[in-house]
Amino acid sequence: MFSFSRTNIFFFSSFIIILNFIWFKWNSFHRRTKKNVPPSPRKLPIIGNLHQLGSSPHRSLQALSRKHGPLMLMHLGSVPVLVASSSEAAREIMKTHDLSFASRPKLSIRDTLLYGSKDIAFSPYGEYWRQVRSIAVVQLLNSARVQSFRQIRENEMALMINMIESSCGSVIDLSEILVMLTNNIICKVALGRTYSGLKFKDLLGRFVHLLGVFSFGNYIPKLSWIDRLSGLDDKARKVAKDFDEFLEGVVEEHIRDKKGVDAKSDEDQDFVDILLDVERDNLTGFALQRDTIKAIILDIFAAGTDTTFTSLEWAISELIRHPTVMKKLQEEVTETTHGRPIIHEKDLENMKYLKATIKETLRLHTPVPLLVPRESTQDVKLMGYDIPAGTQVIINASAIGRDPTLWEEPDEFRPERFLNNIIDYKGLHFELLPFGAGRRGCPGIQFAMVINELALANLVYKFNLTLPNGVKDKDLDMNEINGLTVHKKSPLLVMATPRF
C-alpha cells in the first residue's frame, strides 16, 4: 500500500504539469519545424537522383511523375529540384506564386557564355532583369517592330523557295535549309546582314550546344574537377571569347556606320542599331552597358534560331508521316492564296488549319521540353507542400503536352483537336506551354511564330514532300537528340517536287 503526503502530492502534481508543458512546447515546435515535402524517388549518396535522368530527361521525369505525382522533389547532387508535370502545378508556379518562382539558379556555363548571365533568359530576378526585359519588349519585340521586319522574312522565304526549286527533284537536306533560313532572318534582323559562313555556323552551334550541357560543378561542387578535366570549362571560355570578339566587331562596325550618315528609318534599323540608340540616348533611364547589348543579342540567336528551326523540322516530319493532314493543309493554303505564286504574311491570318498544325507540333514536340529552370526566392506553400527558398524548379512542358488527362490520344498527331479549342501557346493556358508563362515567359513569341507560319505555309503550298529511296512515310526516323532544345536525331532528307 502506497501513501502520499500533501507535500509529495504537490511535488508530483507540479512534476506532471511541467512534463505536460514541456511536451506541449516540444510538440508545437515539432509541428512548426516538420515540413510536408513532395514525394521523392529514392536517391543515392552524393549524386542523389542524377542517375535517373537518363539520355532523355524529359521522358525519364515524365515516367517518374506517373509513379510519384505531378509535384516531385528530386535531388540532383546536393541541389533540391522540384519537378512539375501537370497543368495545375504549372499554373501554381507560373501564375499563383509567379513572383516567388521568378528567379533563375546560378549556373556556371551560362554565366561564362552570357557575360555573367546579363541576358534576359538567364539573369536572376530583380531590377536589372526588369530593365533588360523591358528594353526587349518595348524596343525590340513590340508588334510594330516585328512587323517592320516583314520584308526581310518574305525575301529570305523567296530565296529558300528558289533554292529548293533548283534542286531539280534531287534529295535535299531540308533540316539544313531550315537552319539557313532561320539563321539568315535572325542575322539580318539582329545584325543587319547575314553571316552564313562555316565559321559562324560552327560558333553558333557550339554556343547553343554548351547552353544545354550538364555541368557537374553546379550540382556536386566537390566534382567540379570533372568539368575541368573533361574540357567543358575551357570549351565554354573559348566559345565565349570567340563570340565576344565577333559581336564586338559587329557593334564597332555599327558605331562607325552611324558616324557621318543620316539616321536610319525604323524599318532599316536592326537590333544592334536600336540597342546602341538606347545606350546613347539613355532612353529608359537605365545605363545599358556594352556587355548587356551583346548578351541580349546572344539571347536572340539562341532562342530565335534553334527553337524556330527545330519546330519547323518536327512539323514537316509529322506532315510527311500523316499524308491526310498534309493534304488538308495544302488545300487550305491553296484556297487562301487564290493562285498567287507565293504566300505573304497577310495571307496567314485566316489559315486556321495551319495554326492548328503548328499548335499540335508544339504540343507533341515542345522545343524546350524542360523549361528554363526557375528558383524559389522564398518559402512557399504549393499544393499543400512546403517548398523552401533556394529550390530549383523544373516544369516538364513536354509531359504536360502529353498528359492523357488533358489530351485524348496524347501521342497522336491530330491538329483537329485545336480547331474548336481556345487553348493557345501564349502563356494563358497551362495545358500548352512551349514558351513558358508568367514573368519569365518568352518575350519573342510573336517574332518566332510568324517565321514558323510563313515558312510552313509556303513549303506545303509550293511542294509535295516525299521521302527518298522508297522509304515509307510511317518509317521516317523520329528519334530525338537532347540538348537545350530537342532535335530530330537524323536530318530530314526529302525530295521536293513542285505542286504547280
Image: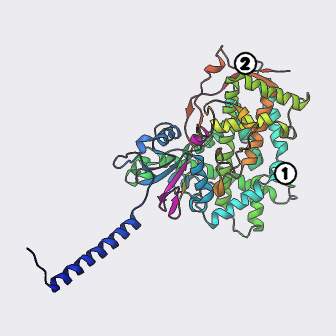
Give the number of the disc on residue 99.
none
Residue at which label 2 appears: 170
Instruction: Using residue 125 as the reference point, say whether residue 253 is left or right of it.
Output: right
Q: How many marks?
A: 2
Question: What is the spatial separation of the Cα atoms under label 2 and label 1, in whole angstroms?
Answer: 37 Å
Relative depth, front residue between 402 and 79:
402
Figure quadrant of residue 79: bottom left
Residue stretch in magenta: 377-401
Q: Position of residue 317 (x, y in %)?
A: 67, 28
Along the polypeptide, which appears first: circle 2 or circle 1? 2
Looking at the picture, tell me which residue is in the foreground, 114 or 73: 73
Q: Position of residue 45 (x, y in %)?
A: 33, 48
Visible in this render: residue 172? no
Amino acid type for the residue under numbered disc 2: Ser
Residue 112 lies in the magenta stretch: no
Which of the colour schemes (rainbow, by chain, secondary structure, one colour) is used?
rainbow
- The quarter of the picture where the N terminus appears is bottom left
Can you give x and y, in whole percent of width and height, for residue 14 in the image? 24, 81
Residue appearing at x 81%, y 33% in the figure: 159
**In the figure, 115 relative to 22: above or below?**
above
Identify which residue is drawn at 81% across, 60% down.
259
Residue position for label 1: 268
Q: Quadrant of the C terminus?
A: top right
Find residue 209 and report its horizontal and vertical position in percent: 56, 42
Q: Nearer the viewer, residue 69 or 266?
A: 69
Q: Decide if residue 9 is in sight here.
A: yes
Other residues around mark 1 within 10 Å, as few (<14) / some (14–19) / many (≥20) = few
Q: Nearer the viewer, residue 353 or 87?
A: 87
- Amino acid bearing label 1: Asp
